[in-house]
Amino acid sequence: MTESLDQDRLRYQAPAPDMVSLLEASSTPSVSLNRSFTWMLTAHMDALVSIEDLAQPELRLAGLRINPRNHAPSRSTHTHAISLQHLQSGESFEVSGLPQPLKLTFLSWSPDGRHIAFAQYAADHLEAWVIEVATKTARRLWEGALNAATGSKPFVWQPNSQGLLVRTVPQGHGSPPERPLVPSGPVVSENNGEIAPVRTFQDLLQDPYDEAVFEYHTTVQWLRVGLDGSVVPVGKPDLYLSVSHSPDGSYLLVDRLKKPFSYLVTYNRFPREIEVWTAQGQFIRSIASVQNGETIPKGFMATREGPRNVEWRSDQAAMLYWVEAQDGGDPAREVPVRDKMFHLAAPFQGDPVFDLDFALRAADVTWGDDHLALIQEYWWNNRRVVTSRFQPGANQPNDTKVILFDRSWEDRYNDPGSFETQYNAYGRQVLLTDASREYLFLSGAGASEDGNRPFVDRYQLADGQTERLWRCEGPVYEYPIQIIDPEGPLLLTRRESNDSPPNYFFRHLETGHLQNITAFPHPYPQLRGVEKQVIRYQREDGVGLNGNLYLPPGYDPEVHGPIPLLMWAYPEEFKSADAAGQVQGSPHQFLRIGWYSPLFWLLKGYAILDDPGMPIVGEGESEPNDRFVPQLVGNARAAIDFLVGRGIADPARVAVGGHSYGAFMTANLLAHTELFACGIARSGAYNRTLTPFGFQSEERTYWEAPEVYRVMSPFAHADKIKAPILLIHGAADNNAGTYPMQSERFYHALKGHGAKARLVMLPHESHGYAARESILHMLWEMTTFLEKHLGTGHLTESKEREATISRSS
């Protein structure tokens, strides 16, 4: 039966008070340390904004969302409280002189650790402020307005810590362009035979007026603003993406946009010019003229031709390095060398110098000195990642390249970890070594069959042997944040458990002594007693699966019997069945509750299976999505059978849900199985013909694999969905492919076939939801829907029994 709704009477709703208090509980603060590890800044962030905040004017241009009033991102979180702590004494201090109400962002320590810069949101501009650590006082740096329209940090510290290079709104910038009442002509796009397989981006430029407004809001004047109040312009106003100092502060690397703009791709694919300037702003040399990114070839390993990833070498005073594709940026070409790396040192004259070549795509470089640096190269199709060492200062660095690790990044059990870094004399990150320079250090998640057990290893350069210095032991989860002293050795770690929130410690590895730094309280006392298990089970084809099972407080399956189950999942593609079965996460991690979490329904007495394995495997020449639906169904059936077999899940009361690709998964499971009593799909895409140049991890286009696109589209199978489905979508979704239209058209298809469906469009919300009113209403919708189709859970049933006994007495 079709239900007619009076839209005028619909208002934002809220769930029960216990769920509201869980949403509004303070999250664990973030911390940051200065480079000498003497001071720590603690920042408390706003978890939610108001719908009034989201309803403010917003420009959607070239992939950006800009608040036209302050030249800043329109959707950002703020820090509302900060404090300083001296690490040696443990004493904490409040900061005086802060603006009120405090709405700060872009916190940044000075290289010498004596000041902290931040940006403060005012009603119609963004302000630059600094905190002097010695006096614990804050002051506004200068009276101008910052420009953070592209979302990048609107300032960088000078290497000498005496001031900031700031992105500002140019003086005399005037008013923004007004849209003409009468257009000057049609908007025309034309292609002259070039192949441009571009994915479906949103918020693109539409016409010349959009171009003018985009240019107005992204035009920047750089200023050098000293802590002493001095202000010196650097260069002229232009469309700058970034400016960075050379390590010695003598030069600037400048990245700026050029015209013509594109109506097909976002701003980061517009033409660009990458240049070297003096520190005072005089042009020296162009390093790269980057062309429009519309015609980048198809595939995840595709890239632009010419110099890319142009960066300063962190261990040298003023030396640039970059890589260039040797295959035209096209991964389909078979070539022995994919990339080459070059460098050019000050004074930036002559030809670039060749350093290394790569059989795969070059990625990150970690510099040490002229005798040692590390670089990674990788390839998507076989998930291969190679880490090599080389000698940058050798006459022929390519001849010194030696492979250290050659592995699949899917294989988490054999991940050697990441090499640790330290700050050098320039204040840049370089490889951490011991005093003898014989050892490097590795840290990582330590994935294992028992879950993640983070570790720290010492790596001997001479022979590549590793020595384990420390490994986390249950029943806690402890992760190394930073090696403070490699000789101690002394670690900064973050330690937590099921019932203890994350806090920070100094760990002395030789003695095992733990020194408590923070003591953040438990934000969710109402969830104490929740039992978390990492469960392991098998798909019928033998692929191992695992997931995080949460049981409500006081629940015992032998006593209380089966209860409703909510499965909340997200599919993931693999090239190896063995890797797909590896355990992820830890049974000892603290419960984290964000707006997106399914753990709210523990308060309703439901069992929650969070992030159960939904691997889609395509080994060898086959692609994962060639068998997407049968593998998805097999994953879901295996999880339900396992929990029903343990007496936990009631097979008649199982719900499935997910966000984004998890919503796509949910719709497919309802279309192709009868396993679920209902499903919840948030902000998904359901018709893959609307994303014809690839989606998620699918590289093939619709025209290359039309049957894959059809079979995977739940829109094409809407007539098969019989279980009730709740669709929720942000009306301002900006994610590539998940247009709000996806949910609207899917709902129409469901309604046309008589399905039990409800569509909720959240005003002003993007792909991730932000407003308090929206999230509370989302929780109310989901709770109402689940209670209607799953009934009551363990806690509710217990309360009803207690009430019955009380009435009988």
Image (cartoon, rainbow, N blue to C red):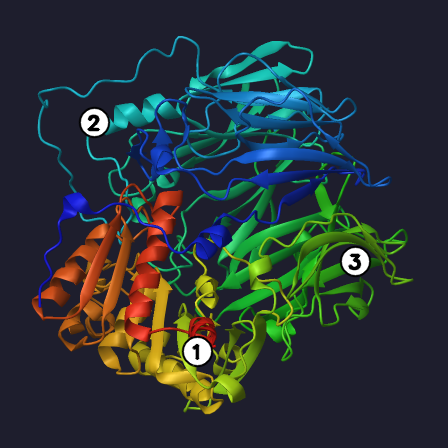
Left or right side of 358 for 801: left
Which numbered mark, 3 or 1, is in the foreground of this view? 1
| Mark 2 surroundings within 10 Å by alpha-carbon count, few (fewer than 14), some (14 through 19), many (20 or more) | some
Q: Where is residue 580 shown, x and y percent of the image?
A: 49, 78
Residue pictured at 40% horizontal, 81% vertical: 635
Say whether marks 3 and 1 touch (CB < 8 Å).
no
Residue pictured at 37% horizontal, 22% vertical: 69
- The type of residue carrying mark 2 is Pro
Left or right side of 585 for 401: right
Quick one: label 2 or label 3, which is nearer the N terminus? 2
- Mark 2–mark 3 Cα distance, whole angstroms, equals 54 Å
Residue 59, quarter of the rendered image? top left
- Do we see residue 276 in this rendering? yes
Q: Where is residue 140 shown, x and y percent of the image?
A: 60, 17
Quick one: label 1 or label 2, which is nearer the N terminus? 2
**Label 2 secondary element:** helix
Which numbered mark, 1 or 2, is in the foreground of this view? 1
- The type of residue carrying mark 1 is Ser
Residue 208, which numbered label?
A: 2
Say whether marks 1 and 2 touch (CB < 8 Å).
no
Q: Is residue 220 above or below residue 638?
A: above
Quickly name the residue at label 1: 808
**Foreground of the two, 767 or 335:** 767
- Mark 3–mark 1 Cα distance, whole angstroms, equals 71 Å
Residue 440, which numbered label?
A: 3
Residue pictured at 65% horizontal, 40% vertical: 313
**Foreground of the two, 19 or 76:** 19
**Label 1 secondary element:** helix
**Label 3 secondary element:** strand
Q: Is residue 357 above or below residue 793?
A: above
**Foreground of the two, 386 or 499:** 499
